[in-house]
């Protein structure tokens, strides 16, 4: 079957547009409200932990399952002896490192060419540069092939997603022109207000359809969308995960993407009704994940969960390495205030009448276990999120199936 070199115009759907704008406004307000609920220091620490979740769910969409524990091990260059497990570990670690580095760049110096083929190639190359050399070749059910991925290079051949029955995306000879069209059509500077978020939704589909690389297109598209959202000022703290939303109903994600691929009757452009449906779906996923995280981070949820964890470390319950129960007050204060001067820790734990030594002993233990962090021995205290507390603080987000065995 010949490739359909469909026009990417119009950039935004022309059907259901008022309804889509209303949904975009709701997402923007909800995301900003969520960011305002969490102290910036807490958000920064938690947001970086959630990068592992982005990686976990992006990998799950591609059909590869791992765990947070395994991803952390891979980040420390510790890999499983099982080939399939190691493969998943390597991909997830590469995703985390790539997202962390590129997000820092986007937030520090927003690029003017986010949608250019050069920047897309930068994302692709950055991801593969974090992987071992054997990942430079495509991977199938039988393992790695001899077919090079060509990191950072636009594909020079046609691709199929259904075992050769049809060609996906534009013909390779037309790809350069289509990518130029994509660049100028979806440049964030072209849009204002809520239309920038709609453009983020639309560009995710368009990039997925373009399929610009030999391999790694799904991961690049999800990395790109996270960067696009941050570029327009949405989810800059990474407090909610788009990939988690997609992976929870993976088949529905794929159906919406594939439906939006369908051409109009004249086979010149995309079917506008399905394109509108896809954009609405993207925004619904965003709103669902924001609401979920807003519930997870609420005072009425976090306080009892910190208590739950500290109680699990109670000496009376047989804990071999107990934590003083007064530590719970300090952890709660750190979560909602962001940071506390070291000299105030004693006050927040209600130990004003105790000796400094007792308070320092508790703080020292919390620092040693990563439950509390500090940039130096004199710097303020901040909350930490070591892996072993995630299932207590955020059980619906980091259930044992996601965290893995510690």
Image (tube, rainbow, N blue to C red):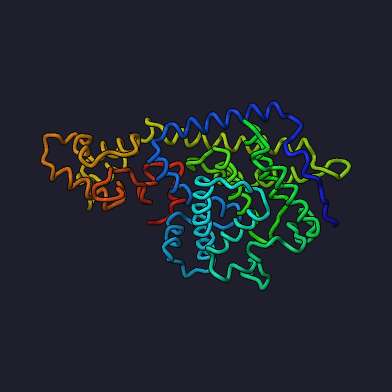
The residue under the point 44% across, 48% down is 48
The residue under the point 39% across, 46% down is 390
Which image quadrant for residue 396? Answer: top left
Q: Position of residue 305 (x, y in %)?
A: 35, 38
From the image, which quarter does the N terminus lie in? Answer: bottom right
Asked whether 147 or 376 is in front, the reply is: 376
Q: Position of residue 188 (x, y in %)?
A: 64, 40
Does residue 176 appear in the picture of this structure?
A: yes
Does residue 140 appear in the picture of this structure?
A: no
Asked whether 314 or 95 is in front, the reply is: 95
- As drawn, which residue projects farthest toward the right? 266
Asked whether 92 or 96 is in front, the reply is: 96
Q: Is residue 136 above or below residue 124?
A: below
Q: Is residue 289 above or below residue 368?
A: above
- As drawn, which residue projects farthest toward the bottom? 146
From the image, which quarter does the C terminus lie in? Answer: bottom left
Is residue 203 toward the left or the right of residue 387 in the image? Answer: right
Which image quadrant for residue 118? Answer: bottom right
Which image quadrant for residue 242? Answer: top right
Q: Is residue 188 above or below residue 29?
A: below
The residue under the point 19% across, 38% down is 346
């Amino acid at each position: 079957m010949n490739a359909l070199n469909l026009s990417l115009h119009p950039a935004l759907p022309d059907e259901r547009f008022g309804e889509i704008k209303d949904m975009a406004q709701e997402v923007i307000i909800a995301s900003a409200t969520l960011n305002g609920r969490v102290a910036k220091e807490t958000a920064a620490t938690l947001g970086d932990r959630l990068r592992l979740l982005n990686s976990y769910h992006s990998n799950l969409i591609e059909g590869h399952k791992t765990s947070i524990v395994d991803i952390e091990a891979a980040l420390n260059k510790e890999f499983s002896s099982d080939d399939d497990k190691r493969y998943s570990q390597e991909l997830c670690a590469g995703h985390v490192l790539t997202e962390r580095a590129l997000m820092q760049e986007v937030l520090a110096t927003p690029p003017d060419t986010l949608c250019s083929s050069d920047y897309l190639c930068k994302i692709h190359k950055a991801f593969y540069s974090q992987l071992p050399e054997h990942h430079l070749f495509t991977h199938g059910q039988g393992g790695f092939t001899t077919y090079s991925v060509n990191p950072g290079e636009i594909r020079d051949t046609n691709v199929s997603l259904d075992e050769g029955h049809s060609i996906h995306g534009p013909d390779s000879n037309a790809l350069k022109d289509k990518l130029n069209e994509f660049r100028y059509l979806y440049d964030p500077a072209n849009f204002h207000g809520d239309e920038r978020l709609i453009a983020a939704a639309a560009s995710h589909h368009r990039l997925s359809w373009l399929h610009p690389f030999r391999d790694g297109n799904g991961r690049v598209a999800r990395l790109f969308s996270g960067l696009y959202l941050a570029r327009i000022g949405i989810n800059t703290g990474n407090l909610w995960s788009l990939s988690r939303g997609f992976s929870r109903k993976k088949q529905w994600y794929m159906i919406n993407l594939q439906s939006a691929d369908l051409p109009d009757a004249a086979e010149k452009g995309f079917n506008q009704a399905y394109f509108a449906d896809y954009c609405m779906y993207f925004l619904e996923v965003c709103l669902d994940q924001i609401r979920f995280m807003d519930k997870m981070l609420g005072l009425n949820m976090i306080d009892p969960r910190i208590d739950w964890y500290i109680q699990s470390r109670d000496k009376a319950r047989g804990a071999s390495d107990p934590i003083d129960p007064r530590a719970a007050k300090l952890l709660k204060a750190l979560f909602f205030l962001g940071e506390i001067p070291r000299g105030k820790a004693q006050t927040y734990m209600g130990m004003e009448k105790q000796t400094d030594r007792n308070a320092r002993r508790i703080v020292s233990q919390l620092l040693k276990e990563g439950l509390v962090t500090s940039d130096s021995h004199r710097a303020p205290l901040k909350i930490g999120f070591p892996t072993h507390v995630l299932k207590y603080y955020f059980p619906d987000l980091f259930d044992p199936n996601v965290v893995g065995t510690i």
